[in-house]
Image (cartoon, coloured by chain):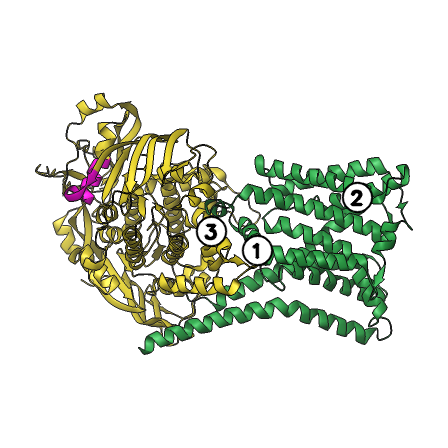
Amino acid sequence: MVAETVLQITGLSKTFGATRALIDVDFSVQAGEVHGLVGRNGSGKSTLIKVLSGYHVPDPGSQLTLGGREVQLPISGRQAAAHGLVFVHQDLGLVPAYSVLENIRLNSWNAQGFERIHWKTETAEVEEELDRFDLNVRAETPVAALSQVDRAIVAIVRAMHHLGKDGKGKVLVLDEPTAYLPKDSVERVFEAVRTVAQTGAGVVLVSHRTDEVLSLTDRITVLRDGRRVETLSTSKTDEQTLVSLILGQTLSSFYPDQVTAKSDDRVLEVEKLNGGLVRDFNITVNRGEIVGLTGLMGAGHDEVPYYIFGARDATSGHIVVNNQILKTQKARPSKAIAAGVVLLPADRLNLSGSAAASVEDNVVVPVFWRYFSGGRLKLAQIRTRVNYLLENFDVRPALPTLEFSSLSGGNQQKTLLAKWLQMEPALLLLHEPTQGVDVGSKSEIFSRITDAAEAGAAVIIASAEYEDLANLCTRVLVFDSGRVVGEVSGAEMSADRLLGLCYRGARARGAHGMIFQWRPYRIGFVPQGTEPEFIETPAPVSVSYVFRWRPHRVGYVELQTLQKAMEPAATPSLERVFQWRPYRIGFVPQGIEPEFIETPAPVSVSHVFRWRPHRVGYVELQTLQKALEPVATPSLERVFRWRPHRVGYFDTAE
Amino acid sequence: MPSATIKIEAREKARQSGVMARRVQAYSILVAWAVLILVFTLLLPDTFLTVQNFTAIANSKTATVLLTLGLIFALAAGEFDLSIGAALSLGAAIPAWLYDVYGTPVLIGILVALMAAALMGTLNALLSVRYSIPSLVVTLGTGTAVIGLVAGIVGNSTISIRGDWWNVVLTHRTFGLYTSFWIVMLIALIIWYILQQTPIGRHLYFVGQGREVARLAGIRVNAYRYAALITSATLGCLAGAFLLGNTGAIQARIGQFFILAAFAAAFLGSTAIVPGRFNAWGTVVAVYFIETGITGLQLLGLQAWVSDVFYGTALVVGVLVATLATRLRSRLSARST
């Protein structure tokens, strides 16, 4: 019952000057498992990854074993690759102007040196790999034309290419591959990760998103302050336990208390705002209120802050802040700032902060004039003030001269929050304020936002993080097709309710709904010559996660034993045993008993397909509503369905 | 709380090592300059370390200094201005030609040239701001066209204004140095003040480092970009007028030969005094550092081609040093895990 260990770290320590970034960490990854590596910023996650990739030299006494063989530390990048250790970093490392084919083959063409590249063969090979990962793009498409999700999958395919078809003994390290992906599409990346794990490779997943780690991994290792806190089996833990392990404190203190400062002083009044996706948007926000704007991708909620701030020109509308009228056309951010409005965009390195400028300049840029007196800038005063702000907002390291881009995501965001909150704004506009931010900083950022509201600011948050909005906001407006389709506040407020509204919105009011057509999707193999049995599965109707069964390896048995159990078998030696376990594929309304569909485990070797939905167009909603009756309700329950998975091989000649 | 103390100490250490690295880099060019002077003094004990030699170096490069000071405005704002050569030609050749052909007073000629240069700067800005064409491309085009126009108007012969009051006043020596040198130092002081001591200067740098961020921080980015490109053209033109005054004779295409020198000095200067930024005193030091090297080599008997080699090398080395220094600094203060 002992699974093969593909990566084993023992007693890993790393010291930077006086700081001990890693202290005696043990970490192991088994073949075929997805192993989550979590911890807040500064916990040592990245240092561990950087030791593996050969960027950092660990302290003496640290040991690394790859595929059963001990490897000399420090390891070089080339050695790592030779030992079957492959990385996909957060920035993916793709060249946008190059085609998918060129990106995947980059340095691994079949031809060498001056030999001719056989484009046809290469294309065919790569497209087969893309197929395996269910990625419906052509090999000659430039990466720039792909969606963020598809790019992430291409990066994984490329890594897979380096691992080889048989992943046994190999390790894929994913460093926050989903940090900047829209939430409703990460499932596809997960599917790709699972495909990798199924080849027998070990996968290490570094992520800030606890929900993702919980739904994807088999085991989780938690790091805190450079030490390994615990390694857990995912099936035996839940989000609360995990977050409290990461933080070293209980989750109850994660969200700040709801804002209590109620006031009738009107700060913002927007009437009939139109522009981009936004249609006829009206809102009034009072002092001390935190208002959330949410919706699915393309709902338009995330454009509103930019129009109010004047960062983009709206087509029409009327905006009043503190009795000052702000122009909606030929608008200038400077006017909005003068009226007390500030905006923190989601794009931290291009819009919110300047990557190349120093931390200090990034903080002071809106308020340079405050430090200009007697004909010169008071540089010492600026430095003192920035030091104070950095300490106060718990930015680490608190070095004003550091380049902004060298801070971690959470610290960048705290810096930018310091930049705007020092102005004591009357209206604070935020767009995805915690995207790519670690759990610890997240908590910190939330309490800063609440503090600002307590102090009398009006706050608008545009976000798709329903849980955060539900805990933070006094009310939340739900958008669909650019219009507000629902408002939630008070006792009704819950993440599920918001989620439900977002999806119902897509059906209830907008002009369009989506239509799906079934198309086949390979899920396993049957013996050649045998007619594969097609199982009709009804189109899923509703609201979010639904589960499907998928096999999960629980150990190994002697092949003889297996052969008795399931006739067709493969090779001598050990074979894997699988057990079915549930795998979430959507949601159904609560109260409805989920229908379980038994699917027999198929036996083997040629492709089997099942139909799955694929959007082919749009229809008027009325038509659609007749077709899809059940709609989202406040709360949800999981549904499971069986799906087949290869459990062995048998000789087709027989 | 020992761990907290350690943390604070570590942070303080990191802060200081960052500050130290910066300070070392800021003045290392002065050390290099001193070494250069020492080497040439040892090699050429009679000719090199003389007052005449140093005043000659100072006086001969005033136009280059002024041209580069104008260029750093554009570079700080994130724009490339290759039309400074044309601006210099305008400022040098137009007044000389007007004086020569129509007898127009040189000062009037300079005013005309300044207006033409400002117009060229405005055109550069219009094309790169309004129509989002990279300024590198725009100014390469306008610069080449304007130099051509100037050559067309003025012709290819050398025009002299020797003996005119502009020539006399600018080359008047105070403590052995030309009036033009003192004026340029005054301008450098003003530019240092604007870039380093006023919010306007800081905004300009920020526009160069993060255009959209600056806009969303309430800075009128486009106004700064216009101002930067117009300033670089105007100061370039003034540099031409100074060149005319210093030498007393000019050729239309003279500007072409100054472009590389200005860029080399600007980039080398950005590694000194205020490392990582295009700054006034760094620029002044860089111009004279390069000129010291060239003069020394020429006194050793090497030919004029030496200056091309030296300027080209200085440009690449300047950028290289800046890159390496940034990398070193971020490694010194790397505490990210």
Which residue is tagged 3? Answer: A366
**Residue A26 image point, x, y percent:** 29, 69
The reply to the same-chain question for discs 1 and 3 is no
> How many numbered callouts?
3
Where does the image place residue B63, in percent across and percent down from the top left?
77, 54
Q: Which chain is yellow?
A: A
Q: Nearer the viewer, residue A416 or A438?
A: A416
Residue at horizontal 43%, vertical 74%? A17
Which residue: 74% across, 60% down? Answer: B310
In the image, residue A498 lies in the stretch drawn in magenta: yes
Where is residue A74? Give x, y as percent.
43, 69
Q: Which chain gets the green colouring?
A: B
Q: Secondary structure at mark 3?
A: helix
Amino acid under label 1?
Thr
**Residue A649 as seen in the image, left or right of residue A367:** left
Q: Which residue is mark 2?
A: B110
Q: Dividing the picture into quarters, in which one does residue A141 lie?
A: top left
Whole-angstrom CA distance, mark 1 to mark 3, is 13 Å
